[in-house]
Amino acid sequence: MAERFVSLQSLMRGTEVPILREGVPSFFGMPVAHTPRELAGADVAVIGIPAGTAASPGRRSDEWSGFEEAPANVRRHSIRYGGYLPELDLDAFEHVSVVDYGDAEIVPGDPERSIDNVARKVREVLEAGCRLITLGGCVPAANYAVIKGMATSTSGRVGVISLDAHGDCMPSFGTPGSDTKPVAGTWQARMWERYPNIDGTRHVEIGMRGPRNLRKMVEMYREKGAHWYPAARVREMGIAAVCREALPFAFDGTARAWFSLDMDVLDIGALPDWGDEPIGLSSLEVMTTVHEAGKSGVDALSFQFVAPRSAAAASVVGYTTVYLLAGWVLGGWIKAGC
C-alpha cells in the first residue's frame, strides 16, 4: 500500500496530500502537473533538480554525497507548513495557485543531457506563463541549466540576483574542461559567454566572504560591471538598505529576472547540521532579500546545494518559499483574491 502523507492543510480541510511518486509528497501538498498542458492556469510551478556532485578540493569524498536526494527531502519536510505569515496577516496559499511539476531528468555521467533536460522543463514553465521555483541539487544542473532555460526563452535581457558565499565567475580553474564547461566556480562565466541577453551590468552578487574566494573573482565582477555586495557590506549597510540599493539593478531594462540562491551564503550557525562557512548571512537576511525580490517581480528562484540530510536546510527552503509567494502577492504580480 502506498504511503499516505498528512499536511497541515490536509488535516484542517480533510483532504489528501498528492503523491509525486512512491514515498514523496508534492511540495507543500500542492497539485501535481505531469504535462505542460496541466500547467495552464497555475501562477507558480515547482521543479526538482536531483543532481549530485563530486566533492570540491579540500573536502572528504563523502562530504557532499546524497545531494540528489534534496528535492524529495524538501518536499517531505514542506508539508508541515501552511502559507500564513502573521506579521503580514497574509495567507499566500489563498492567493497563489502552485503546482508541483515533478523533477527534471538527471542523467548520471552526462551533464550536457542533464542541462538540456532541466532547461527544457524550465522553458515549459515559463512558456505556460508561470513563475518558477526550482529545488536543487548541484552545479551545473541546478543553476547554469536554469538560467539557460530562462535566457533561451526570453527575447529581452535577463537580470540575475545571486546570493552565494563564493564568486562562481572564474574563466577557468585550471582543471580539465573548466575553461569551456559550466562547472563549480565557472558557471557564471559560461553564462555570460553563451547568452548575450544576460548582461553583467544587470547582475547583483550578494554574500561573498572568506578564504575560499580568489582575487580574480572580484576582478571579474568589476570587469563585467556587476553590482557586488560582500557579506561584510551587508553587515555594514543592513539588509534593507542593500535591497533598496541593489535589487533594482536586476530589474532595470530587463524582461525577466532570476534569483540564484546557493545555500552556502547562510552562516554556519543558520544550518547547524550542515553549515559550510562562518560569518555569512542570517536566514532573516536571506528571506528578506527573497521577499523583496518577489515584491519587485522576480520571475524565478532557484535553491541550490540544499543539504539532503539537514532539517534546518529544508526548513529554510519552506520558509523562504512562503515569503517569496507573499512578496509576489504584495507586489501585485499575483493578484490577491484570484
Image (spheres, rainbow, N blue to C red):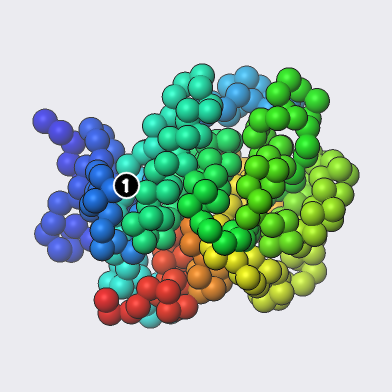
Query: Quarter-wise, where is residue 45 in the image?
Result: bottom left
The residue at the point 57 percent across, 61 percent down is 156
Where residue 76 sits in the image (x, y, percent)? 33, 44
User: How many numbered marks does the figure carry?
Assistant: 1
Q: Relative to 186, is 201 above or below? A: below
Residue drawn at 49 percent across, 46 percent down: 149
Is residue 206 visible in the rendered structure shown here?
no
Along the viewing direction, whichever of 321 and 82 lies nearer the viewer: 321
Label 1 element class: strand
Q: Label 1 sits on what residue type?
A: Tyr
| Residue wearing tag 1 | 101
**Could you tell me which quadrant the N terminus lies in?**
top left
**Crowd band around label 1 with a 10 angstrom C-alpha radius: few (<14), some (14–19), many (20+):** many
Q: Is residue 301 left or right of residue 89?
A: right
Res 59 → quadrant: top right
The part of the image, by quadrant, that contains residue 332 is bottom left
Query: In which quadrant will I find the C terminus?
Result: bottom left
Does 190 sit above or below residue 303? Answer: above
Asked whether residue 214 appears in the rendered view, the answer is yes
Between 97 and 307, the one lying in front of the other is 97
Determine the residue positioned at 35% across, 45% down.
75
Q: Position of residue 329 (x, y in %)?
A: 40, 75
